[in-house]
Image: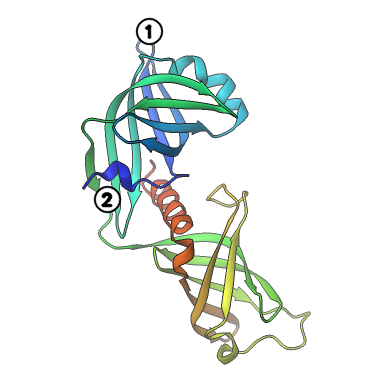
Amino acid sequence: MNLIKELQPGTIVNISLYDKVHNRLKFKMIYVGLIENEYLILKFQNITSAANDSHDLKAGVQLSIQTVVAQEYLTALNFQVSSLGISKLREPLLLVEYPKMVKGQRLRTTPRISVELMANITYPKLDRQYLALISDFSMTGLKCEYLLNEEVLENPTSEELTGQEVNVEFVANDDLDMDFSISGVVKNARQREKVQLGVEFTEEDSGVVKSAFAILLMREYGL
């Protein structure tokens, strides 16, 4: 299997190189896509990074790259390539060689991780929204909990929540550092002092889920 083709757009990529005096420089960029057998396309995280880092990533510089493929399990990828330089289209993009050899190492043997993330949980059909703590995240779903809204006369019961469509919205100031939402269906619900949910993701959002899963796992392993 060509693991490079399994990389999802939006995945964080760690780049390191040595300058002329052998100091090691490190950069974080975002994977955009590839032209098979020609090059990979990476973008800068923000305008400041593009302005500060472009001169160190000029064509011909040898780069060490680390990133992850988030399939059912986490696989770390390591490869060496040369920079092909900065291509300025709508924004500066870094082009790097298509890797000839990629080393892959499975980092995780279970397909879910424990997390502590805040997100807005919305039930479109019930017109209700709650701030929830995500405690478990996998490629197929998540577990979360939230407090009942005391300002609402009637909060939905566990029976009413089970089977409900739900949107899970993350915002840029959380640990994922990006705005996105994932759709799902409540598979189980329990209600005592808090509401606890098990949510199954819809297949339509599989690309977003893979990107989020990759970022969370990279943070967990310090990549």
Identify the residue under disc 2: 107
Q: Is residue 147 left or right of residue 74?
A: right
Q: Is residue 61 left or right of residue 105?
A: right
Instruction: Give the vertical position of 25 relative to 140 (above or below).
Output: above
Q: What scheme was used to colour the molecule?
A: rainbow
Image coordinates of residue 27 in percent, x first then y, are: 45, 28
Mark 2 neighbour class, 10 Å CA radius: few under 14, some 14 to 19, many 20 or more: some
Quadrant of residue 137 within the rendered picture: bottom left
Viewer-proximal residue, 44 or 18?
44
Residue at the farthest top position: 21
Q: In the image, what residue occupies the spot 62% across and 49% down? A: 172
Secondary element under disc 1, as helix, strand or loop, is loop
**Residue appearing at x 51%, y 19% in the figure:** 54
Q: Which numbered disc covers residue 146?
A: none
Residue 136 lies, with reference to residue 59, above or below; the image says below
Q: Amino acid at mark 2?
A: Leu
**Does label 2 or label 1 sit earlier along the sequence?**
1
Identified at 57% across, 77% down, the residue is: 165
Query: In which image quadrant can residue 98 be found?
Result: top left
Q: Position of residue 90 (x, y in %)?
A: 60, 29
Label 2 SS: loop
Of the pair 150 and 56, the residue shown nearer to us: 56
The answer to whether the residues at label 2 and label 1 have Cβ atoms under 8 Å apart is no
- Across and down, in percent, residue 183 comes to 54, 68
Q: Where is residue 136 shown, x and y percent of the image?
A: 44, 66
Which residue type carries mark 1?
Lys
Horizontal placement of 183 versus 2: left or right?
Answer: right
Q: Nearer the viewer, residue 9 or 56?
A: 9
Neighbour class for label 1 at 10 Å: few (<14), some, many (≥20)? few
The residue at which mark 1 appears reads as 20
